[in-house]
Image (spheres, rainbow, N blue to C red):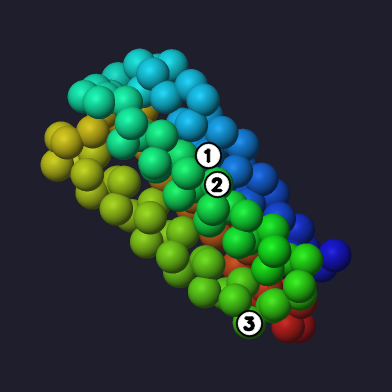
Amino acid sequence: MNNARRSLFFFGLYMIFGVGVGFIFMPMFILNTFGLSAGDDVWIRFVGLLGSIIGGYYLLIVRAKFDQFIPWTVAMRLYGAAFIVVIVLLGKLGPSMLLFGAIDAAGAVWTWLALRSSTK
C-alpha cells in the first residue's frame, strides 16, 4: 500500500469509527463533549450513517487501487475544514469543533504530501 492509499485508509477508518460509529451509537456523548445541541437525536445518527458510508467508500477505493479518486479527496477534505473554520468564526459553533476541521485538514495534507512524493 503506497503512502497516499495509507493516508486515505486511515482517514476512512476515522470516518467509520470516529464519526460514523460515534454519532450512530453515542450521539449525545459526542454532542455534549463539543457543546452542541441535538434537538432530536435522530438527525445526528443520520450524520453518523453518512460519515460511515463515506469512510467505507474510502476503504473500498484503497482496496480497489482507484488512485484517480485520491487527489479529489484532498480538495474536499480541505473544503470541509474551511467550512468548519468559517462556521466557528461566524459564532455558529464553538471552537472545540475546530478539532474536526483540524483532523480533516491534517488528513488532506498527509494525502497531498504522499501524492507529491510519489510523483517525484
Q: Which part of the image, by quadrant, shows the C terminus? A: bottom right
The answer to whether residue 61 is visible is yes
The amino acid pointed to by label 2 is Ser
**Relative vertical location of residue 44 with respect to residue 112 in this rendering, above or below:** above
User: Residue 104 location, x and y as percent?
Assistant: 49, 50
Q: Which part of the image, by quadrant, shows the N terminus? A: bottom right
Question: In the rendered image, which residue does mark 2 sit on?
Answer: 52
Tell me whether the residue at label 2 lies in contact with that at label 1, contact meaning CB atoms closer than 8 angstroms.
yes
User: Residue 29 location, x and y as percent?
Assistant: 43, 16
**Along the polypeptide, which appears first: circle 3 or circle 1?**
1
Q: CA distance from mark 2 to mark 1?
A: 4 Å
The amino acid pointed to by label 3 is Gln
Report the residue at 33% width, 55% height from top: 82
Q: Specify the label residue 117 is tagged with.
A: none
| 36 with respect to 69 (left or right) | left
Question: In the rendered image, which residue does mark 3 sit on?
Answer: 68
**Along the polypeptide, which appears first: circle 2 or circle 1?**
1
Report the residue at 76% width, 58% height from top: 6
User: Residue 34 location, x and y as percent?
Assistant: 36, 23
| 7 with respect to 96 (left or right) | right
Q: CA distance from mark 3 to mark 1?
A: 25 Å
The amino acid pointed to by label 1 is Gly
| 40 with respect to 98 (left or right) | left
Secondary element under disc 3, as helix, strand or loop, is loop
Secondary element under disc 2, as helix, strand or loop, is helix
Mark 2 vs mark 3, foreground winner is: 2
Location of residue 36 by image quarter: top left
Question: In the rendered image, which residue does mark 1 sit on?
Answer: 20
User: Residue 4 location, x and y as percent?
Assistant: 71, 66
The answer to whether residue 100 is visible is no
- Label 3 crowd bin: few (<14), some (14–19), many (20+), radius 10 Å: few
The number of numbered badges drawn on the structure is 3
